[in-house]
Amino acid sequence: MKQILGFMVTAVILSVIGFMLGSYQTDVYRKVLLWVTLALSYNFLFGIAGQVAFSHFTFYGIGAYAIVILIFQVGLPLPLAILATVAICVVLALVVAIPATRLDGFYLALATLAFAQLFIVVLDEGGTVTGSAGGLANYRLPDVFGMQVSGPWYTVVIVLLMLATLAILWRLDRSYFGRACRAVRDDSEAAQAMGVNVARTKIIAYTITSALAGIAGMVYAFVDNTVNPPIFGLSNSFLLLFMVIVGGSGRHAGAIVGAVLLYLMPLVLSPIIGHHHALVFGVFMVAVVLFQPKGVIGIWDWLQARIGSKA
Amino acid sequence: MKDFLELTVGALASGCIYGLAALSYLLITRPTGIINFAVGEWSMLGAFGGFLLLSRFNLPYPVGIALILLGMFLIGWLTERLTVRPLVERGAPPLAPILALLGMLVVFREVVSLVFGPDPQPVPPAFGFGRLELGPVAGSYQSFFIIAVTLTVFAAVWYFFERTLAGKSFEAVAIDRRAASLMGINLRRVTAFAFAASAVVAGLAGILVAPNVSAHYLMGLPLAIQGFTALVIGGVGRVEGALLGGVILAFVEQLTVRYLPIPPGLAMGVPLVLLILFLLLRPTGLLRAREARA
Protein backbone atom coordinates (compact mmCIF):
# COMPACT_ATOMS: atom_id res chain seq x y z
CA MET A 1 0.00 0.00 0.00
CA LYS A 2 2.75 2.39 1.01
CA GLN A 3 4.65 1.50 -2.15
CA ILE A 4 1.66 2.13 -4.38
CA LEU A 5 1.24 5.53 -2.74
CA GLY A 6 4.92 6.24 -3.28
CA PHE A 7 4.65 5.42 -6.98
CA MET A 8 1.55 7.62 -7.34
CA VAL A 9 3.20 10.60 -5.65
CA THR A 10 6.32 10.17 -7.82
CA ALA A 11 4.13 9.96 -10.93
CA VAL A 12 2.38 13.22 -10.03
CA ILE A 13 5.62 15.05 -9.22
CA LEU A 14 7.40 13.87 -12.39
CA SER A 15 4.34 14.76 -14.49
CA VAL A 16 4.01 18.23 -12.97
CA ILE A 17 7.67 18.87 -13.82
CA GLY A 18 6.77 17.97 -17.39
CA PHE A 19 4.25 20.83 -17.52
CA MET A 20 6.77 23.43 -16.37
CA LEU A 21 9.42 22.98 -19.05
CA GLY A 22 10.24 24.82 -22.25
CA SER A 23 10.50 22.93 -25.55
CA TYR A 24 14.26 22.18 -25.37
CA GLN A 25 13.99 21.18 -21.72
CA THR A 26 10.99 18.99 -22.52
CA ASP A 27 13.03 17.17 -25.14
CA VAL A 28 15.90 16.56 -22.71
CA TYR A 29 13.50 15.56 -19.93
CA ARG A 30 11.70 13.01 -22.12
CA LYS A 31 14.97 11.49 -23.30
CA VAL A 32 16.30 11.24 -19.76
CA LEU A 33 13.13 9.41 -18.74
CA LEU A 34 13.44 7.05 -21.71
CA TRP A 35 17.11 6.32 -20.99
CA VAL A 36 16.21 5.64 -17.36
CA THR A 37 13.51 3.22 -18.54
CA LEU A 38 15.98 1.42 -20.79
CA ALA A 39 18.70 1.37 -18.14
CA LEU A 40 16.28 -0.13 -15.63
CA SER A 41 15.39 -3.06 -17.85
CA TYR A 42 18.98 -3.47 -19.01
CA ASN A 43 20.09 -3.47 -15.41
CA PHE A 44 17.78 -6.41 -14.80
CA LEU A 45 19.20 -8.28 -17.78
CA PHE A 46 22.87 -7.44 -17.22
CA GLY A 47 23.15 -6.60 -13.53
CA ILE A 48 20.65 -9.01 -12.01
CA ALA A 49 20.45 -11.87 -14.52
CA GLY A 50 24.12 -11.48 -15.50
CA GLN A 51 23.65 -11.68 -19.27
CA VAL A 52 26.05 -9.51 -21.26
CA ALA A 53 23.77 -8.86 -24.21
CA PHE A 54 24.23 -6.06 -26.72
CA SER A 55 20.78 -6.53 -28.20
CA HIS A 56 18.86 -4.38 -25.74
CA PHE A 57 18.97 -1.20 -27.75
CA THR A 58 18.07 -3.22 -30.84
CA PHE A 59 14.76 -4.20 -29.27
CA TYR A 60 14.18 -0.52 -28.54
CA GLY A 61 14.60 0.01 -32.27
CA ILE A 62 12.38 -2.95 -33.17
CA GLY A 63 9.60 -1.50 -31.00
CA ALA A 64 9.96 1.94 -32.56
CA TYR A 65 10.03 0.70 -36.15
CA ALA A 66 7.26 -1.83 -35.60
CA ILE A 67 4.71 0.68 -34.33
CA VAL A 68 5.46 3.18 -37.11
CA ILE A 69 5.31 0.55 -39.83
CA LEU A 70 2.14 -1.04 -38.45
CA ILE A 71 0.27 2.28 -38.23
CA PHE A 72 1.49 4.05 -41.34
CA GLN A 73 2.33 1.27 -43.80
CA VAL A 74 -0.08 -1.46 -42.73
CA GLY A 75 -2.78 0.97 -41.58
CA LEU A 76 -3.74 -0.61 -38.26
CA PRO A 77 -5.62 1.55 -35.73
CA LEU A 78 -3.49 2.66 -32.80
CA PRO A 79 -4.71 0.26 -30.05
CA LEU A 80 -4.35 -2.73 -32.36
CA ALA A 81 -0.93 -1.54 -33.50
CA ILE A 82 0.22 -1.25 -29.88
CA LEU A 83 -0.90 -4.79 -29.11
CA ALA A 84 0.71 -6.11 -32.27
CA THR A 85 3.98 -4.31 -31.52
CA VAL A 86 4.14 -5.76 -28.02
CA ALA A 87 3.42 -9.19 -29.48
CA ILE A 88 6.16 -8.77 -32.10
CA CYS A 89 8.69 -7.73 -29.43
CA VAL A 90 7.84 -10.66 -27.17
CA VAL A 91 7.95 -13.20 -30.00
CA LEU A 92 11.20 -11.85 -31.44
CA ALA A 93 12.79 -11.73 -27.98
CA LEU A 94 11.80 -15.37 -27.45
CA VAL A 95 13.16 -16.38 -30.84
CA VAL A 96 16.50 -14.78 -30.00
CA ALA A 97 16.52 -15.88 -26.37
CA ILE A 98 15.97 -19.61 -26.86
CA PRO A 99 19.18 -20.22 -28.82
CA ALA A 100 21.22 -17.26 -27.51
CA THR A 101 20.91 -17.90 -23.79
CA ARG A 102 22.47 -21.32 -24.30
CA LEU A 103 25.72 -19.47 -24.97
CA ASP A 104 27.60 -18.30 -21.98
CA GLY A 105 29.86 -15.39 -21.22
CA PHE A 106 31.24 -13.48 -24.11
CA TYR A 107 29.79 -15.81 -26.75
CA LEU A 108 26.38 -14.38 -25.84
CA ALA A 109 27.87 -10.89 -26.16
CA LEU A 110 29.20 -11.72 -29.64
CA ALA A 111 25.96 -13.33 -30.82
CA THR A 112 23.84 -10.40 -29.67
CA LEU A 113 26.35 -7.96 -31.14
CA ALA A 114 25.96 -9.73 -34.48
CA PHE A 115 22.17 -9.62 -34.10
CA ALA A 116 22.35 -5.86 -33.41
CA GLN A 117 24.48 -5.29 -36.52
CA LEU A 118 22.17 -7.48 -38.57
CA PHE A 119 19.20 -5.31 -37.51
CA ILE A 120 20.99 -2.23 -38.91
CA VAL A 121 21.72 -4.06 -42.18
CA VAL A 122 18.04 -5.00 -42.49
CA LEU A 123 16.96 -1.40 -41.78
CA ASP A 124 19.36 -0.04 -44.39
CA GLU A 125 18.13 -2.49 -47.01
CA GLY A 126 14.44 -2.50 -46.09
CA GLY A 127 13.41 -0.34 -49.08
CA THR A 128 10.21 1.61 -48.58
CA VAL A 129 9.10 -0.51 -45.61
CA THR A 130 11.85 0.76 -43.30
CA GLY A 131 12.72 3.83 -45.37
CA SER A 132 16.28 2.49 -45.89
CA ALA A 133 19.15 4.69 -44.68
CA GLY A 134 16.96 7.77 -44.32
CA GLY A 135 14.49 6.02 -42.02
CA LEU A 136 10.86 7.04 -41.59
CA ALA A 137 9.80 10.58 -40.73
CA ASN A 138 6.93 13.06 -41.08
CA TYR A 139 4.37 11.06 -39.16
CA ARG A 140 2.56 11.93 -35.97
CA LEU A 141 0.69 10.08 -33.27
CA PRO A 142 -2.86 9.26 -34.45
CA ASP A 143 -5.78 10.60 -32.41
CA VAL A 144 -7.15 8.43 -29.66
CA PHE A 145 -10.94 8.76 -29.33
CA GLY A 146 -10.70 12.02 -31.26
CA MET A 147 -8.03 13.41 -28.93
CA GLN A 148 -4.43 14.18 -29.75
CA VAL A 149 -2.02 13.27 -26.97
CA SER A 150 0.75 15.83 -27.31
CA GLY A 151 3.00 18.28 -25.51
CA PRO A 152 3.26 17.75 -21.75
CA TRP A 153 0.57 15.06 -21.87
CA TYR A 154 2.89 12.89 -23.92
CA THR A 155 5.56 13.49 -21.29
CA VAL A 156 3.05 12.07 -18.79
CA VAL A 157 2.84 8.93 -20.94
CA ILE A 158 6.62 8.58 -20.72
CA VAL A 159 6.58 9.13 -16.95
CA LEU A 160 3.98 6.37 -16.61
CA LEU A 161 6.02 4.08 -18.87
CA MET A 162 9.12 4.60 -16.73
CA LEU A 163 7.28 4.00 -13.47
CA ALA A 164 5.44 0.96 -14.81
CA THR A 165 8.76 -0.51 -15.94
CA LEU A 166 10.27 0.19 -12.54
CA ALA A 167 7.26 -1.34 -10.75
CA ILE A 168 7.35 -4.52 -12.86
CA LEU A 169 11.09 -4.98 -12.39
CA TRP A 170 10.85 -4.15 -8.69
CA ARG A 171 8.24 -6.86 -8.15
CA LEU A 172 10.16 -9.34 -10.28
CA ASP A 173 13.38 -8.65 -8.41
CA ARG A 174 11.73 -9.31 -5.08
CA SER A 175 10.05 -12.52 -6.21
CA TYR A 176 11.28 -16.09 -6.50
CA PHE A 177 12.17 -15.30 -10.08
CA GLY A 178 14.48 -12.40 -9.14
CA ARG A 179 16.33 -14.52 -6.62
CA ALA A 180 16.62 -17.31 -9.17
CA CYS A 181 18.14 -14.83 -11.66
CA ARG A 182 20.74 -13.70 -9.14
CA ALA A 183 21.54 -17.30 -8.26
CA VAL A 184 22.04 -18.19 -11.93
CA ARG A 185 24.26 -15.12 -12.38
CA ASP A 186 26.49 -15.94 -9.43
CA ASP A 187 26.82 -19.67 -9.98
CA SER A 188 24.61 -21.44 -12.48
CA GLU A 189 25.70 -24.92 -11.41
CA ALA A 190 24.86 -24.25 -7.78
CA ALA A 191 21.53 -22.75 -8.86
CA GLN A 192 20.80 -25.86 -10.89
CA ALA A 193 21.63 -28.03 -7.91
CA MET A 194 19.20 -26.01 -5.77
CA GLY A 195 16.42 -26.80 -8.21
CA VAL A 196 16.40 -23.63 -10.33
CA ASN A 197 15.59 -24.27 -13.96
CA VAL A 198 18.59 -22.38 -15.36
CA ALA A 199 17.65 -22.41 -19.04
CA ARG A 200 14.09 -21.26 -18.39
CA THR A 201 15.21 -18.52 -15.99
CA LYS A 202 17.64 -17.14 -18.55
CA ILE A 203 15.11 -17.22 -21.37
CA ILE A 204 12.37 -15.53 -19.32
CA ALA A 205 14.74 -12.83 -18.05
CA TYR A 206 15.93 -12.06 -21.57
CA THR A 207 12.42 -12.06 -23.03
CA ILE A 208 10.80 -9.86 -20.38
CA THR A 209 13.56 -7.24 -20.34
CA SER A 210 13.84 -7.15 -24.13
CA ALA A 211 10.08 -6.79 -24.49
CA LEU A 212 10.18 -3.90 -22.00
CA ALA A 213 12.85 -2.27 -24.15
CA GLY A 214 10.63 -2.77 -27.19
CA ILE A 215 7.70 -1.08 -25.44
CA ALA A 216 9.95 1.85 -24.50
CA GLY A 217 10.97 2.07 -28.18
CA MET A 218 7.31 2.15 -29.18
CA VAL A 219 6.84 5.23 -26.97
CA TYR A 220 10.08 6.76 -28.26
CA ALA A 221 8.83 6.61 -31.87
CA PHE A 222 6.55 9.60 -31.19
CA VAL A 223 9.09 11.67 -29.27
CA ASP A 224 11.23 12.71 -32.22
CA ASN A 225 8.68 11.58 -34.81
CA THR A 226 11.44 10.02 -36.81
CA VAL A 227 13.18 6.65 -36.74
CA ASN A 228 16.40 5.96 -38.65
CA PRO A 229 19.21 3.40 -38.55
CA PRO A 230 21.96 5.55 -36.91
CA ILE A 231 19.80 6.07 -33.78
CA PHE A 232 19.75 2.35 -33.12
CA GLY A 233 23.44 1.69 -33.84
CA LEU A 234 25.96 -0.05 -31.65
CA SER A 235 27.27 3.04 -29.88
CA ASN A 236 24.04 3.40 -27.95
CA SER A 237 24.14 -0.26 -26.90
CA PHE A 238 27.55 0.38 -25.39
CA LEU A 239 26.32 3.59 -23.77
CA LEU A 240 23.53 1.63 -22.11
CA LEU A 241 26.03 -0.86 -20.70
CA PHE A 242 28.19 2.01 -19.42
CA MET A 243 25.17 3.63 -17.75
CA VAL A 244 24.41 0.52 -15.75
CA ILE A 245 28.05 0.03 -14.75
CA VAL A 246 28.67 3.65 -13.83
CA GLY A 247 25.50 3.81 -11.78
CA GLY A 248 26.02 0.49 -10.04
CA SER A 249 24.97 -2.74 -11.69
CA GLY A 250 22.33 -4.89 -10.05
CA ARG A 251 20.63 -1.94 -8.37
CA HIS A 252 17.55 -0.07 -9.64
CA ALA A 253 18.79 3.17 -8.08
CA GLY A 254 22.15 2.60 -9.76
CA ALA A 255 20.55 2.30 -13.19
CA ILE A 256 18.60 5.53 -12.63
CA VAL A 257 21.65 7.48 -11.44
CA GLY A 258 23.85 6.09 -14.23
CA ALA A 259 21.35 6.91 -16.98
CA VAL A 260 20.77 10.47 -15.77
CA LEU A 261 24.49 11.09 -15.25
CA LEU A 262 25.73 9.75 -18.57
CA TYR A 263 22.92 11.25 -20.62
CA LEU A 264 23.38 14.71 -19.13
CA MET A 265 27.19 14.62 -19.04
CA PRO A 266 27.78 15.47 -22.73
CA LEU A 267 25.00 18.08 -22.65
CA VAL A 268 26.67 19.83 -19.73
CA LEU A 269 30.27 19.31 -20.84
CA SER A 270 30.17 20.01 -24.58
CA PRO A 271 29.50 23.79 -24.28
CA ILE A 272 32.50 23.99 -21.91
CA ILE A 273 35.10 21.71 -23.46
CA GLY A 274 33.65 20.83 -26.86
CA HIS A 275 34.32 17.36 -28.25
CA HIS A 276 36.69 16.55 -25.37
CA HIS A 277 33.63 15.37 -23.47
CA ALA A 278 33.88 11.99 -25.22
CA LEU A 279 37.40 11.56 -23.85
CA VAL A 280 36.24 12.55 -20.36
CA PHE A 281 33.54 9.92 -20.75
CA GLY A 282 36.07 7.19 -21.57
CA VAL A 283 38.41 8.10 -18.72
CA PHE A 284 35.45 8.29 -16.34
CA MET A 285 34.36 4.83 -17.45
CA VAL A 286 37.78 3.25 -16.86
CA ALA A 287 38.11 5.05 -13.51
CA VAL A 288 34.75 3.73 -12.31
CA VAL A 289 35.63 0.13 -13.17
CA LEU A 290 39.05 0.45 -11.53
CA PHE A 291 38.26 2.44 -8.42
CA GLN A 292 34.54 2.22 -7.78
CA PRO A 293 33.37 -1.24 -8.94
CA LYS A 294 30.03 -0.79 -7.19
CA GLY A 295 29.33 2.32 -9.25
CA VAL A 296 28.31 5.80 -8.19
CA ILE A 297 25.60 4.36 -5.96
CA GLY A 298 28.43 2.68 -4.01
CA ILE A 299 29.67 6.14 -2.97
CA TRP A 300 26.21 6.88 -1.60
CA ASP A 301 26.27 3.64 0.42
CA TRP A 302 29.68 4.53 1.77
CA LEU A 303 28.52 8.03 2.77
CA GLN A 304 25.47 6.58 4.48
CA ALA A 305 27.59 4.10 6.40
CA ARG A 306 29.94 6.89 7.48
CA ILE A 307 27.12 9.12 8.70
CA GLY A 308 25.40 6.16 10.31
CA SER A 309 28.50 5.14 12.25
CA LYS A 310 29.04 8.68 13.55
CA ALA A 311 25.48 9.16 14.77
CA MET B 1 37.16 -18.72 -63.79
CA LYS B 2 39.37 -15.72 -64.64
CA ASP B 3 36.95 -13.66 -62.61
CA PHE B 4 37.44 -15.95 -59.64
CA LEU B 5 41.24 -15.87 -59.87
CA GLU B 6 41.09 -12.07 -59.99
CA LEU B 7 39.23 -12.17 -56.74
CA THR B 8 41.52 -14.67 -55.04
CA VAL B 9 44.47 -12.43 -54.21
CA GLY B 10 42.33 -9.59 -52.91
CA ALA B 11 40.24 -11.96 -50.80
CA LEU B 12 43.31 -13.70 -49.44
CA ALA B 13 44.79 -10.34 -48.47
CA SER B 14 41.67 -9.22 -46.59
CA GLY B 15 41.47 -12.68 -45.06
CA CYS B 16 45.01 -12.21 -43.77
CA ILE B 17 44.05 -8.88 -42.17
CA TYR B 18 41.05 -10.53 -40.46
CA GLY B 19 43.33 -13.37 -39.43
CA LEU B 20 45.76 -10.94 -37.79
CA ALA B 21 42.90 -9.24 -35.92
CA ALA B 22 41.67 -12.67 -34.81
CA LEU B 23 45.18 -13.62 -33.71
CA SER B 24 45.31 -10.43 -31.68
CA TYR B 25 42.18 -11.52 -29.77
CA LEU B 26 43.47 -15.04 -29.43
CA LEU B 27 46.82 -14.07 -27.92
CA ILE B 28 44.97 -12.45 -25.00
CA THR B 29 41.95 -14.72 -24.72
CA ARG B 30 43.86 -17.97 -24.75
CA PRO B 31 45.97 -17.46 -21.60
CA THR B 32 43.70 -15.05 -19.71
CA GLY B 33 40.10 -15.62 -20.83
CA ILE B 34 39.74 -11.87 -21.38
CA ILE B 35 38.12 -10.71 -24.61
CA ASN B 36 39.61 -7.37 -25.54
CA PHE B 37 37.17 -5.31 -27.60
CA ALA B 38 39.84 -2.62 -28.00
CA VAL B 39 41.74 -4.73 -30.58
CA GLY B 40 40.20 -2.69 -33.42
CA GLU B 41 41.34 0.51 -31.71
CA TRP B 42 44.86 -0.85 -31.42
CA SER B 43 44.84 -1.41 -35.18
CA MET B 44 43.69 2.16 -35.61
CA LEU B 45 46.61 3.35 -33.47
CA GLY B 46 48.97 1.35 -35.70
CA ALA B 47 47.47 2.93 -38.80
CA PHE B 48 47.85 6.43 -37.38
CA GLY B 49 51.42 5.57 -36.39
CA GLY B 50 51.91 4.75 -40.07
CA PHE B 51 50.42 8.07 -41.12
CA LEU B 52 52.62 10.00 -38.67
CA LEU B 53 55.95 8.28 -39.31
CA LEU B 54 55.62 7.26 -42.97
CA SER B 55 53.48 10.01 -44.51
CA ARG B 56 54.35 13.02 -42.39
CA PHE B 57 57.95 12.35 -41.31
CA ASN B 58 58.79 10.32 -44.43
CA LEU B 59 60.80 7.70 -42.56
CA PRO B 60 61.97 4.69 -44.59
CA TYR B 61 59.32 1.97 -44.50
CA PRO B 62 61.25 -0.66 -42.44
CA VAL B 63 62.36 1.92 -39.86
CA GLY B 64 58.87 3.34 -39.55
CA ILE B 65 57.30 -0.10 -39.13
CA ALA B 66 59.85 -1.10 -36.52
CA LEU B 67 59.21 2.04 -34.50
CA ILE B 68 55.44 1.61 -34.71
CA LEU B 69 55.60 -2.00 -33.59
CA LEU B 70 57.83 -1.01 -30.70
CA GLY B 71 55.30 1.66 -29.76
CA MET B 72 52.46 -0.88 -30.00
CA PHE B 73 54.38 -3.24 -27.72
CA LEU B 74 54.59 -0.46 -25.12
CA ILE B 75 50.93 0.47 -25.53
CA GLY B 76 49.84 -3.14 -25.05
CA TRP B 77 52.08 -3.58 -22.05
CA LEU B 78 50.89 -0.30 -20.48
CA THR B 79 47.24 -1.16 -21.11
CA GLU B 80 47.69 -4.40 -19.20
CA ARG B 81 49.68 -2.73 -16.45
CA LEU B 82 47.25 0.14 -15.87
CA THR B 83 43.80 -1.37 -16.44
CA VAL B 84 43.98 -5.14 -16.20
CA ARG B 85 46.55 -6.03 -13.57
CA PRO B 86 45.06 -3.93 -10.73
CA LEU B 87 41.70 -5.64 -11.31
CA VAL B 88 43.13 -9.15 -11.49
CA GLU B 89 45.18 -8.63 -8.35
CA ARG B 90 42.19 -7.33 -6.47
CA GLY B 91 40.30 -10.49 -7.45
CA ALA B 92 37.63 -8.54 -9.38
CA PRO B 93 35.02 -10.59 -11.30
CA PRO B 94 36.19 -11.75 -14.75
CA LEU B 95 33.91 -9.24 -16.46
CA ALA B 96 35.67 -6.23 -14.88
CA PRO B 97 38.82 -6.19 -17.07
CA ILE B 98 36.64 -6.60 -20.16
CA LEU B 99 34.65 -3.52 -19.17
CA ALA B 100 37.80 -1.55 -18.35
CA LEU B 101 39.15 -2.40 -21.81
CA LEU B 102 35.84 -1.30 -23.32
CA GLY B 103 36.42 2.05 -21.58
CA MET B 104 39.97 2.14 -22.97
CA LEU B 105 38.48 1.66 -26.44
CA VAL B 106 36.68 4.99 -26.01
CA VAL B 107 39.83 6.63 -24.62
CA PHE B 108 42.03 5.47 -27.57
CA ARG B 109 39.44 6.50 -30.13
CA GLU B 110 38.81 9.93 -28.66
CA VAL B 111 42.48 10.73 -28.15
CA VAL B 112 43.10 9.95 -31.82
CA SER B 113 40.09 11.96 -32.99
CA LEU B 114 41.29 14.94 -30.94
CA VAL B 115 44.92 14.74 -32.09
CA PHE B 116 44.39 13.92 -35.77
CA GLY B 117 40.89 15.24 -36.39
CA PRO B 118 37.96 13.39 -37.93
CA ASP B 119 39.30 13.27 -41.51
CA PRO B 120 40.81 10.11 -43.01
CA GLN B 121 44.60 10.30 -43.38
CA PRO B 122 46.72 8.57 -46.05
CA VAL B 123 49.21 5.82 -45.25
CA PRO B 124 51.62 4.68 -47.99
CA PRO B 125 51.81 1.03 -49.09
CA ALA B 126 55.10 -0.83 -48.75
CA PHE B 127 56.06 -0.95 -52.45
CA GLY B 128 53.95 1.76 -54.10
CA PHE B 129 50.65 1.27 -55.90
CA GLY B 130 51.77 -1.21 -58.55
CA ARG B 131 50.08 -4.36 -59.78
CA LEU B 132 51.73 -7.74 -59.96
CA GLU B 133 50.66 -10.46 -62.41
CA LEU B 134 51.75 -14.04 -61.90
CA GLY B 135 50.17 -15.84 -64.81
CA PRO B 136 46.40 -15.79 -64.27
CA VAL B 137 46.76 -14.64 -60.65
CA ALA B 138 47.00 -10.88 -60.20
CA GLY B 139 46.77 -8.36 -57.43
CA SER B 140 48.26 -5.18 -56.04
CA TYR B 141 51.75 -5.16 -54.57
CA GLN B 142 50.24 -4.40 -51.19
CA SER B 143 48.01 -7.51 -51.34
CA PHE B 144 50.99 -9.75 -51.95
CA PHE B 145 52.91 -7.93 -49.24
CA ILE B 146 50.03 -8.44 -46.76
CA ILE B 147 49.88 -12.15 -47.53
CA ALA B 148 53.65 -12.59 -47.15
CA VAL B 149 53.86 -10.66 -43.88
CA THR B 150 50.86 -12.46 -42.39
CA LEU B 151 52.22 -15.89 -43.27
CA THR B 152 55.53 -14.94 -41.65
CA VAL B 153 53.78 -13.71 -38.50
CA PHE B 154 51.68 -16.85 -38.22
CA ALA B 155 54.70 -19.08 -38.83
CA ALA B 156 56.61 -17.24 -36.11
CA VAL B 157 53.74 -17.42 -33.62
CA TRP B 158 53.19 -21.09 -34.42
CA TYR B 159 56.89 -21.77 -33.90
CA PHE B 160 56.83 -19.84 -30.63
CA PHE B 161 53.90 -21.82 -29.22
CA GLU B 162 54.93 -25.25 -30.49
CA ARG B 163 58.69 -25.25 -30.26
CA THR B 164 59.89 -22.88 -27.55
CA LEU B 165 59.71 -23.24 -23.81
CA ALA B 166 58.30 -19.73 -23.32
CA GLY B 167 55.53 -20.56 -25.80
CA LYS B 168 54.72 -23.79 -24.02
CA SER B 169 54.36 -21.84 -20.79
CA PHE B 170 51.62 -19.79 -22.54
CA GLU B 171 49.86 -22.98 -23.56
CA ALA B 172 50.20 -24.31 -20.03
CA VAL B 173 48.54 -21.19 -18.65
CA ALA B 174 45.78 -21.57 -21.22
CA ILE B 175 45.10 -25.16 -20.20
CA ASP B 176 45.21 -24.69 -16.43
CA ARG B 177 46.11 -21.37 -14.85
CA ARG B 178 46.50 -22.70 -11.34
CA ALA B 179 48.58 -25.72 -12.21
CA ALA B 180 50.80 -23.57 -14.44
CA SER B 181 51.42 -21.12 -11.67
CA LEU B 182 52.23 -23.95 -9.27
CA MET B 183 54.79 -25.21 -11.79
CA GLY B 184 56.61 -21.91 -11.41
CA ILE B 185 55.28 -20.10 -14.47
CA ASN B 186 55.07 -16.36 -13.86
CA LEU B 187 51.40 -15.59 -14.61
CA ARG B 188 51.95 -11.84 -14.51
CA ARG B 189 54.70 -11.96 -17.05
CA VAL B 190 52.69 -14.21 -19.37
CA THR B 191 49.68 -11.87 -19.14
CA ALA B 192 51.74 -8.72 -19.75
CA PHE B 193 53.51 -10.31 -22.69
CA ALA B 194 50.22 -11.58 -24.13
CA PHE B 195 48.82 -8.04 -24.16
CA ALA B 196 52.00 -6.56 -25.64
CA ALA B 197 52.17 -9.18 -28.39
CA SER B 198 48.48 -8.78 -29.12
CA ALA B 199 48.91 -5.02 -29.53
CA VAL B 200 51.85 -5.57 -31.90
CA VAL B 201 49.80 -7.94 -34.08
CA ALA B 202 46.79 -5.59 -34.06
CA GLY B 203 49.00 -2.61 -34.91
CA LEU B 204 50.55 -4.55 -37.79
CA ALA B 205 47.08 -5.32 -39.16
CA GLY B 206 46.30 -1.60 -38.95
CA ILE B 207 49.40 -0.51 -40.87
CA LEU B 208 48.87 -3.17 -43.53
CA VAL B 209 45.22 -2.38 -44.18
CA ALA B 210 45.60 1.43 -43.92
CA PRO B 211 46.78 2.06 -47.53
CA ASN B 212 43.46 0.63 -48.76
CA VAL B 213 41.06 2.18 -46.24
CA SER B 214 43.06 5.24 -44.95
CA ALA B 215 43.69 5.86 -41.27
CA HIS B 216 40.45 7.00 -39.69
CA TYR B 217 39.43 7.21 -36.05
CA LEU B 218 36.36 5.03 -36.65
CA MET B 219 38.19 2.28 -38.57
CA GLY B 220 38.49 0.11 -35.43
CA LEU B 221 34.99 -1.22 -34.99
CA PRO B 222 34.51 -2.95 -38.37
CA LEU B 223 37.93 -4.56 -38.03
CA ALA B 224 37.13 -5.66 -34.48
CA ILE B 225 33.90 -7.31 -35.62
CA GLN B 226 35.55 -9.02 -38.61
CA GLY B 227 38.37 -10.15 -36.34
CA PHE B 228 36.17 -11.88 -33.82
CA THR B 229 33.98 -13.36 -36.55
CA ALA B 230 37.15 -14.92 -37.95
CA LEU B 231 38.12 -16.05 -34.47
CA VAL B 232 34.75 -17.73 -33.86
CA ILE B 233 34.86 -19.48 -37.26
CA GLY B 234 38.38 -20.75 -36.76
CA GLY B 235 38.10 -21.50 -33.06
CA VAL B 236 39.77 -19.82 -30.10
CA GLY B 237 41.89 -22.86 -29.33
CA ARG B 238 44.46 -22.87 -32.13
CA VAL B 239 46.67 -20.28 -33.76
CA GLU B 240 46.08 -21.67 -37.27
CA GLY B 241 42.35 -21.36 -36.64
CA ALA B 242 42.60 -17.56 -36.63
CA LEU B 243 44.10 -17.49 -40.12
CA LEU B 244 41.74 -20.15 -41.45
CA GLY B 245 38.75 -18.27 -40.04
CA GLY B 246 39.94 -14.99 -41.53
CA VAL B 247 40.42 -16.45 -44.99
CA ILE B 248 37.03 -18.23 -44.94
CA LEU B 249 35.31 -15.03 -43.82
CA ALA B 250 36.98 -12.96 -46.54
CA PHE B 251 36.08 -15.45 -49.27
CA VAL B 252 32.47 -15.66 -48.11
CA GLU B 253 32.26 -11.85 -48.14
CA GLN B 254 33.78 -11.45 -51.59
CA LEU B 255 31.91 -14.34 -53.16
CA THR B 256 28.50 -13.16 -51.90
CA VAL B 257 29.16 -9.64 -53.14
CA ARG B 258 30.27 -10.96 -56.53
CA TYR B 259 27.99 -13.89 -57.21
CA LEU B 260 24.88 -13.87 -55.01
CA PRO B 261 21.92 -12.06 -56.56
CA ILE B 262 21.22 -9.87 -53.53
CA PRO B 263 21.85 -6.15 -53.05
CA PRO B 264 25.38 -5.33 -51.80
CA GLY B 265 23.99 -3.86 -48.56
CA LEU B 266 22.36 -7.16 -47.65
CA ALA B 267 25.56 -9.00 -48.52
CA MET B 268 27.08 -7.18 -45.55
CA GLY B 269 24.75 -9.21 -43.38
CA VAL B 270 26.10 -12.56 -44.61
CA PRO B 271 29.21 -12.59 -42.36
CA LEU B 272 26.98 -11.71 -39.40
CA VAL B 273 24.68 -14.62 -40.16
CA LEU B 274 27.76 -16.82 -40.49
CA LEU B 275 28.95 -15.64 -37.07
CA ILE B 276 25.59 -16.39 -35.45
CA LEU B 277 25.39 -19.82 -37.09
CA PHE B 278 28.88 -20.74 -35.92
CA LEU B 279 28.17 -19.54 -32.39
CA LEU B 280 25.03 -21.64 -32.21
CA LEU B 281 26.10 -24.75 -34.09
CA ARG B 282 29.82 -25.00 -33.50
CA PRO B 283 30.99 -22.65 -30.74
CA THR B 284 34.40 -24.33 -30.60
CA GLY B 285 35.14 -23.26 -34.16
CA LEU B 286 36.49 -25.41 -36.96
CA LEU B 287 39.71 -26.33 -35.18
CA ARG B 288 39.41 -27.66 -31.67
CA ALA B 289 41.89 -26.85 -28.93
CA ARG B 290 44.34 -29.62 -28.13
CA GLU B 291 43.57 -31.64 -25.07
CA ALA B 292 46.09 -31.45 -22.29
CA ARG B 293 48.67 -34.11 -23.03
CA ALA B 294 50.07 -36.32 -20.35
Image (cartoon, grey):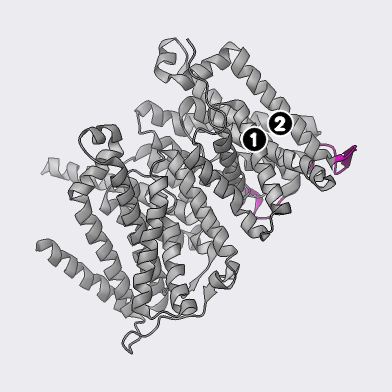
Position in image of residue B32 (x %, y %): 47, 27
Quadrant of the snapshot with the C terminus of chain A? top left
Looking at the rendered structure, the kind of residue marked 1 is Gly
Estimate how packed mark 2 is, as few (under 14), some (14 to 19) or many (20 or more) residues with alpha carbons within 10 Å: many
* Numbered disc 1: secondary structure: helix
**Quick check: can you spot residue A290?**
yes
- Mark 2–mark 1 distance (CA, rounded to whole Å): 8 Å
Q: Quadrant of residue A229?
A: bottom right
Q: Residue at x 35, y 66 (%)?
A: A86
Left or right: where B55 falls relative to B220: right
| Residue behind mark 2 | B150
x and y percentages locating residue A119 in the rendered image: 51, 58
Image coordinates of residue A236 in percent, x first then y, are: 47, 56
| Residue pointed to by mark 1 | B19
Seen from the viewer's position, the closer of residues A201 and B64 is A201
Mark 1 belongs to which subunit? Answer: B
Numbered circle sitting on residue B94: none
In magenta stretch: residue B277:
no
Secondary structure mostly seen in the magenta stretch: loop
Asked if disc 2 and disc 1 are in contact, CB closer than 8 Å, the reply is yes
The disc numbered 2 marks a residue on which chain?
B
State the residue at coordinates (66%, 59%): B262
Q: Magenta stretch containing residue B123, yes or no?
A: yes
Residue B199 visible from this viewpoint: no
- Give residue A181's quadrant in the image: top left
Q: Position of residue A173 (x, y in %)?
A: 22, 51
- Which region shows up in magenta? B115-137
For mark 2, give the secondary structure.
helix
As drawn, which residue projects farthest toward the bottom? Answer: A146
The residue that appears at 32% across and 53% down in the rendered structure is A255
